[in-house]
Image: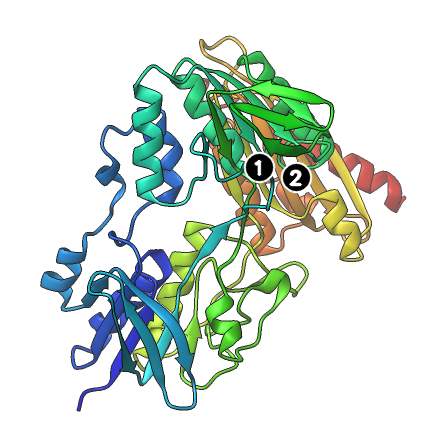
Amino acid sequence: MAERLVVIGGDAAGMSAASQVRRMRPDVDVVALEMGTRTSYAACGIPYHVAGLVPEVDDLVARTPDEFRNRQRIDVRLRSQATAIDTAAGAVEVRDLARDRTYTLGYDHLLIGTGARPVRPPIPGIDADWVAGVKTLDDSAALAARAASGEIRRVVVVGGGYIGIEMAEAFVERGCAVTVVDAAPQVLGTLDADMAERVRAGMEAAGITVRLGVGVQGFDDHRVVLADGELPADLAVLGLGVTPNSGLAADAGIDLGPRGAIRVDRRQRTSAERVWSAGDCATARHLLTGEDVFFPLGTIANRQGRVAGINIGGSYATFGGVIGTAITKVCDTEVARTGLGEAEAAAAGFEVVTAVAESRTRAHYYPGAERIAVKVLADRRSGRLLGGQIVGGQGSAKRIDTLATAVTAGFDLDRMVDLDLAYAPPFSPVWDPVVTACRQALRTFSQGRS
């Protein structure tokens, strides 16, 4: 009998691993269990479908179940929920939701790619029909239909993280009055406070009302109840972040790591024999601190899934790690970050020098030059670049890739200021803002050395 790989989860990590195994091992029986009705879809694109920028919800699907079945001979089983894992027997209990039956599926290798689930606290009224979560493409289709109906005029977004500000932008695009509420003192908690303040200012310039430092106590008859009053709303959208969907693994006795994510080694192996994990349910190693972290992003999920697939397929690969690179936008304000922020660096034992450079995305005389602020952080002892953050207008945020590459490569400030970056007036000032920020940080670093 052929070896069997069972994949739990039909999205980025799971299907990346399944596809890799199929390429390497045509003889392996590959079965993918997906609780929903779609595979390999871009959840990151949901806000842009809700905004109307992506016309059809199925435009977000990268590869359909039929494509996996017909092109790659991957047995995709939709509406199939894994309910238990028996690592000793090498078997998964499966609930067939469509046929209302339960069966057992044996495996030689198991890949857990169950992803993350949205945070949904037990707040009174949170299950009201005018309070919406954002997880699946069905959620996206429902929100887009409501937004297009013209009946939604006032929207309150609960949460000022990435998904929160992206959903705020989506409803601004729809012409709604939008308020973002967060109990934290700033939006985007992965940014330093000074850079987050620039994001807040950009949101308010776009007409978004931002209420920080105030928690939501309940939802009552189209009113969002706050500690200091109420906000009327036709629709409330939850954007409170995600947590690893690791309960199935925990119940099977598999070790968990930070924030309850499934602990994996650099080959994506879990603590259980022949059981692997990847994606938003799994840990990753931070390149700067060496610690296991939980960092749910589609790019990481695809990379980890590929590594797991190579190893399951009989070859050898390791996952290189993460440095927390992320990028987004809210209306006209682009935002990106990589590496460590000030609080993270301090917690990791670094003493840092920082600098913020304010510049333009293009030569000042070229049409369309936008403001940009670049913050860099470096180790005070060695001058090694530890991280960077960018907030600015169009053409700002993708400069984070220069900083991410440099952090990964271990560049110090001396090397950063000597980078041979491209220049032409439509793309950059003569001194790119990234280099300008590093020059300012180098001056501070050099003064400390003398």
Furthest-right residue in view? 450
Q: Which mark is residue 347?
A: none
Q: Looking at the rendering, which quadrant does residue 289 occupy?
A: bottom right
Q: Is residue 392 left or right of residue 84?
A: right
**Pointer 2 with pointer 1, Cβ within 8 A:** yes
Q: Quadrant of the C terminus?
A: top right
Specify the quadrant of the image occupied by residue 84.
bottom left
Query: What distance separates the C-alpha of mark 2 from that of mark 1?
Result: 7 Å
Total labels drawn: 2
Look at the picture and state if 5 lies above or below 261. below
Most foreground residue, 278 or 152: 152
On the image, the x and y values in percent for residue 32 come to: 26, 67
Q: Which residue is mark 2?
A: 189
Name the residue located 18 percent from the left edge and 57 percent from the top edge: 65
Q: In the image, residue 77 lies at what x, y percent?
A: 21, 65
Which amino acid does the dot numbered 1 rest on? Gly
- Which part of the image, by quadrant, shows the N terminus? bottom left
- Left/right placement of residue 309 relative to residue 388 reads left
Which residue reaches farthest left?
Answer: 70
Dot 2 lies on which element?
A: loop
Tell me if residue 16 comes above or below residue 377 in the rendering: below
Labels 2 and 1: the sequence-earlier one: 1
Closest to the observer: 41 or 441? 41
Rendered location of residue 192, percent (x, y): 70, 36
Q: SS at mark 1?
A: loop
User: Percent position (x, y) of residue 242?
Assistant: 53, 49
In the depicted structure, whether residue 14 falls above or below residue 398? below
Dot 1 alpha-carbon crowd within 10 angstroms: few under 14, some 14 to 19, many 20 or more? many
- Which residue is located at x 29 percent, y 81 percent? 104
Q: Which residue is mark 1?
A: 161
Could one spot residue 137 in this view of the protein?
yes
Residue type of the residue flagged with mark 2:
Gly
